[in-house]
Amino acid sequence: MSLRTILFISVVFIVLLSCGDNSSDSANSRNNDPAFEDDFEILKNKNENIPIKTKEFYKYLVRGHKKKENGDYKGAIDDFNLAIKLKPKLSNLYDARGTAKYYKGDYDGAILDYNQSINLNSKNPLSYYNRGLAENCLQKYSESIKDFNKAIELKPNYFDAFKNRGLAKSDSGDINGSIADFSKLIEISPKYPGPYNNRGIAYSINKDYKSAIIDFSKAHKIDWKNPNILINRGLAYRSLKKQKEALEDFKQATVLGPDMASGFHYFSDTLINSTASKAKMVIALKNSLKANQLSYFKNIYYLETLSWAYEKNNHIKESIDILKKVISLTPDDQPNKKRFIKRLKHLNTIKN
């Protein structure tokens, strides 16, 4: 089971590694961007010892990087094309163009550029790392892991390569292997929260919730403002049926992340399943409504919880209306659809 897989049936653990996503999360990622050397390093390029012959080349190179940073990936690719025409033997130019293609979502094209970079310079760990990222996005996990291995061979203690190899191992089903990589990251950078958080997720997938809670607690101690870590720990507590601790974490997550739907959803869902108090069911309904407002009423599992919250508050008509929406949004091949339909029949008998 993948570290990136969302387990909506019972639990969801929060991680961030989106292919082509230029964003970053303080707890779950350090740097998921394809790597490239800065302009100065590209230009002097000691390994190939290629001198700068024209201002035109420098103009295309710098302009291409600026366009990439501003999200104009097509424009960046065009400029890197022009730079490559002037310096076709400069390996890092292919890394730069491959990075733009990666962000554009052209992973196959990015891999071709990284291949060319490696052909020109087989000793650059960045090219293997970049190619590993693109391969991972194409779910070519075996190839991805091999490239991360090579990057680490060329650059021991390569933080991002260990991290993404750990994620690739998880995606390929090697959870214990991913735990080993995240453990190595903790050795490399013990004061960074991401490895603890990701190892905690891996432990949770292995159903070792006690170890997961220890790791989430360490991550939270370092990055106490991050609501994702609290949600992850709350889910682990919930798996151990420690509802009180889970509710405390979910509640704190809503304070730290008032615009995050998940905190409100899990607080409401856990409350519904842990008490019959009418007063608390009112609170559960309020939190579920907030979660669905933040998610624009499109998440079927958030909506299902809202339907339950309405039912617990004896608002049967509203519960039925929401459940009908859940059913309409659920694909026919989704196993839960039968469960939703069965519950709708039950609610209709209550209504009548």
Image (cartoon, rainbow, N blue to C red):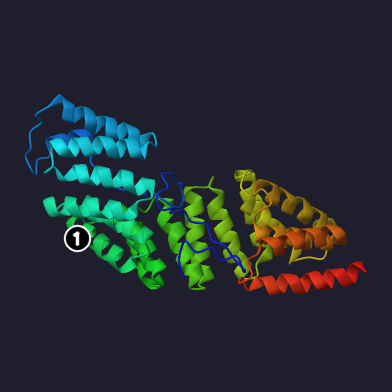
Tell me residue 208's x, y (percent).
50, 72
Which residue is at the front of the view, 254 or 309? 309
Residue 187 seen in the figure: no
Q: How many marks?
A: 1
Which residue is at the front of the view, 12 or 118? 118
Residue 160 seen in the figure: yes
Horizontal relation, residue 99 to residue 210: left or right: left
Q: Quadrant of the C terminus?
A: bottom right
Tell me residue 284's x, y (percent).
76, 56
Q: Which residue is mark 1?
A: 153
- The amino acid beneath tag 1 is Glu
Residue at 13 percent across and 42 percent down: it is 88
Residue at 41 percent across and 53 percent down: it is 19
Residue at 19 percent across and 60 percent down: it is 153
Residue located farthest toward the top when viewing the structure as drawn: 55
Which residue is at the front of the view, 45 or 68? 68
Horizontal relation, residue 216 to residue 280: left or right: left
Which residue is at the front of the view, 144 or 211? 144
Tell me residue 46's x, y (percent).
9, 40
Say few, some or many: other residues with alpha carbon within 10 Å of mark 1 (under 14 / 14 to 19 / 20 or more): few
Tell me residue 70's x, y (percent).
38, 33
Eyeballing the image, is 318 above or below 94?
below
Horizontal relation, residue 320 to residue 211: left or right: right
Residue 236: image quadrant is bottom right
Residue located farthest toward the right when viewing the structure as drawn: 352
Q: Judging from the image, what secondary structure is the residue with disc 1 in? A: helix
Eyeballing the image, is 2 above or below 54?
below
Eyeballing the image, is 106 above or below 312?
above
